[in-house]
Image: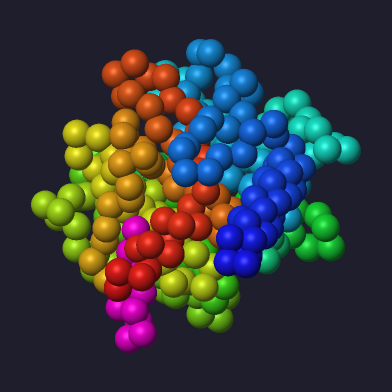
């Protein structure tokens, strides 16, 4: 009787796994879905003379946005592919892409605002032309023009890679104009404006510089990269007192070749990140099922 029960449970589990995998393949319009080993995502849409830097979906999973640059890092552009009857369309420039460089995009959790980093001029006195944060709002299914996101105490800094919570709080990295002293900051959204930013107090090994944050919509966990000989992906969780716990490095299957630009799908199931050898300049966006990793790290708190 016990053996029969075990067999029934195992069969039910395997059937559930197969069903979930089939559903995921349909949802993401792919032939293969990762489990605990990262695999490439849509590498065939990246031209051979370009580098891919980040990939992410719209909250409804109907569009996939990604950043590419030339191999000298002189021009960054954001492209998008869209679902059409279960097939991804051909890549085209994102509607907010310009002759300037664009990167570090993310959606608000409700999908009505897209944030991104751009080198386009701000047209405000005494603000240098470097990476700043911009946004576009959707109204009645139409996207408005890009608007500069002014963070008062960081106007003279390089500011990039915004990630926004359900409450509107924005996380991002900022540095000096020469990319030194890069760290993660956050800014509260009050009465339609972002307030003075504060540096996040994150303790990491050797207190390395940090970049490319991704915060969960409920602000219960934060993913980011530390900067050293290679990039390493880290995770930390917010405790009951509202403080971020000491960051932990993600497992070696993820951290094996320099990686950054983390992003987690709206179902909290898959982690997307960019990895590759910086010397060979051959990078790819990979994805992996992150459910176990999230639970495993959260249980250690």
Residue found at x 79% / y 39%:
83
**Extreme-top residue of the structure:** 49
* Picture coordinates of residue 99, whole percent (x, y): 58, 30
7 or 52: nearer the viewer: 7
Q: How is the image coloured?
A: rainbow
Residue found at x 19% / y 34%:
229
* Picture coordinates of residue 69, whole percent (x, y): 49, 26
Give the vertical position of 4 relative to 238 (above or below).
above
Residue 152 shows in the view:
no
- Give the magenta part as a residue range: 235-244
Q: Magenta part mainly helix, strand or loop?
A: loop
105 or 234: nearer the viewer: 234
**Extreme-left residue of the structure:** 206
- Quadrant of residue 93 within the rendered picture: top right
* Picture coordinates of residue 208, whole percent (x, y): 18, 50
Q: Is residue 236 a member of the stretch shown in magenta?
A: yes
Residue found at x 62% / y 39%:
33
Q: How many marks?
A: 0
- Quadrant of residue 82 within the rendered picture: top right
* Picture coordinates of residue 70, whole percent (x, y): 47, 20
Quadrant (top left/top right/bottom left/bottom right) for the C terminus: bottom left
Give the vertical position of 55 relative to 109 (above or below).
above
**Extreme-front residue of the structure:** 1
Q: Is residue 275 left or right of residue 190?
A: left
Quadrant (top left/top right/bottom left/bottom right) for the N terminus: bottom right
Q: Is residue 295 left or right of residue 248?
A: right
């Amino acid at each position: 009787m016990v053996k029969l029960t075990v067999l029934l449970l195992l069969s039910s589990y395997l059937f559930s796994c197969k069903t979930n995998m089939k559903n995921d393949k349909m949802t993401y319009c792919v032939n293969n879905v990762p489990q605990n080993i990262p695999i490439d995502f849509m590498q065939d849409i990246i031209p051979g003379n370009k580098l891919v830097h980040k990939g992410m979906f719209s909250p409804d999973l109907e569009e996939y946005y990604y950043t590419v640059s030339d191999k000298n890092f002189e021009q960054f552009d954001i492209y998008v592919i869209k679902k059409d009857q279960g097939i991804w369309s051909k890549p085209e420039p994102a509607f907010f892409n310009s002759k300037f460089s664009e990167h570090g995009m993310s959606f608000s959790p409700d999908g009505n605002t897209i944030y991104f980093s751009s080198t386009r001029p701000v047209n405000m006195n005494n603000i240098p032309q470097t990476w700043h944060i911009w946004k576009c709002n959707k109204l009645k299914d139409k996207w408005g023009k890009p608007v500069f996101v002014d963070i008062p105490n960081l106007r003279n800094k390089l500011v990039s890679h915004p990630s926004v919570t359900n409450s509107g709080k924005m996380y991002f990295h900022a540095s000096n104009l020469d990319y030194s002293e890069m760290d993660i900051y956050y800014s509260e959204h009050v009465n339609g404006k972002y307030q003075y930013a504060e540096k996040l107090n994150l303790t990491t090994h050797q207190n390395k510089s940090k970049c490319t944050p991704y915060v969960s919509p409920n602000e219960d966990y934060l993913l980011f990269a530390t900067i050293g000989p290679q990039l390493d992906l880290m995770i930390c969780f917010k405790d009951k007192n509202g403080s971020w716990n000491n960051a932990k490095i993600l497992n070696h299957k993820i951290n094996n070749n320099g990686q950054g630009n983390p992003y987690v799908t709206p179902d909290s199931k898959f982690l997307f990140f960019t990895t590759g050898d910086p010397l060979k300049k051959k990078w790819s966006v990979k994805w992996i099922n992150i459910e176990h990793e999230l639970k495993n790290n959260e249980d250690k708190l």
